[in-house]
Amino acid sequence: MQQGSFQAIAAGLEQIMENARLDLRAAMDQFEELCLRITAERNVPIDIFTETRQAYKKIQDQLTKISGARQLLEGKYKHYYRRNYQLEKEIMQIAFLAKSLYLTFEETDAKRKRKGVQEYSEAHGQQIVFPWFQSKENQIVLLRNLHNLDELDYKTKFKLGFERRQEVIQNVLRSVFLFALLGEPKLIDILQSRMRFREYDITERYKEDEFRGALTHLKEVSPSEVQKVLRRIVGTSEFLKLKCLLLKIQSQDDLKKAIVRTAGDILRSMDEGEVRLLSI
């Protein structure tokens, strides 16, 4: 009876691997198509870069699922595992190709960002006068987002693939929220890997124990709403020791204020687990 049960479980795990393989191939097809559309010289909509990262994540998710099923089959259920060498070879080839394409994609994206920074700097001749980010590239992107805050827009997609412009209510108070998280480097590593950001958001590992970012909202969002979201994150048991600081800014002039320059000192003086909203 037990042997039959083990055989059924092994068969189920093999089926999981097969289903994941099919999903992996579909994700890989989408990823390859997106990568072909992206070059450093071509003006590509920013949402394509977001979609490309999401497609790569789907590939990694399926590879993880396959790896988990295979580990069980090669361990506890090895006597009932009918190893499929052709499937393993195909998965290995897809994983290698996906990694190679993703490295090329990241290089192209870096070139695109450097080009954008150079163009903005040449157009505005602007000196960086605030220390929120250490990366000049991130500083320029934040300035550019604030400068064009009323003109930013983003896309959504229907499930069938038809694109439409997401409706953005005009004449509302758009804003950018600066945030900083401070704590043990391992906790910052975990949190950084789990947080999901949108196309106009900016993030930076400011220090080993500090993670900073700027959240761009294209509709009116109250500071208390953002504070509640961050409080829920920091309030979970594994992140109770993190400190979180939040500032709402609406113009480049806000970045020059003293409270932004002293935010790091304020953050380090806070209590563990505290989420504080600063008024500009």
Image (cartoon, grey):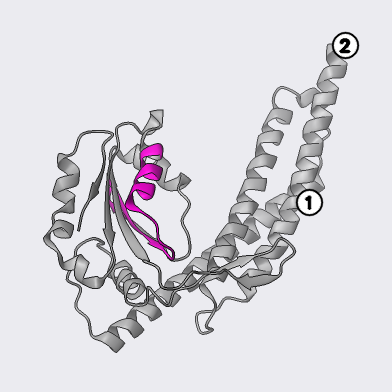
Determine which quarter of the picture holds residue 25: bottom right
Q: Residue at x 48, y 69 (%)?
A: 169
Dot 2 alpha-carbon crowd within 10 angstroms: few under 14, some 14 to 19, many 20 or more: few
Q: Nearer the viewer, residue 56 or 84?
A: 56
Q: Position of residue 164 (x, y in %)?
A: 64, 72
| Left or right of residue 54: residue 247 | left
Element type at marker 1? helix
Provide residue 240's location: percent of width, then percent of height.
33, 31
- Inspect this view and state whether residue 276 appears: yes
Region rendered in magenta: 204-232
Q: Which residue is mark 1?
A: 22
Residue located 64% across and 74% down the image: 36
Residue placed under numbered mark 2 in the picture = 1
**What's the amino acid at mark 2?**
Met
Separation of marks 1 and 2 at Cα, in angstroms: 32 Å
Question: Is 202 drawn above or below residue 92 in the view shown?
Answer: below
For image coordinates 74% across by 29% down, the residue present is: 73
- Front residue (pair 167, 258): 167
Look at the image and tell me in which quarter the C terminus lies.
bottom left
The circle drawn on residue 42 is none
Viewer-closest of 170 and 51: 170
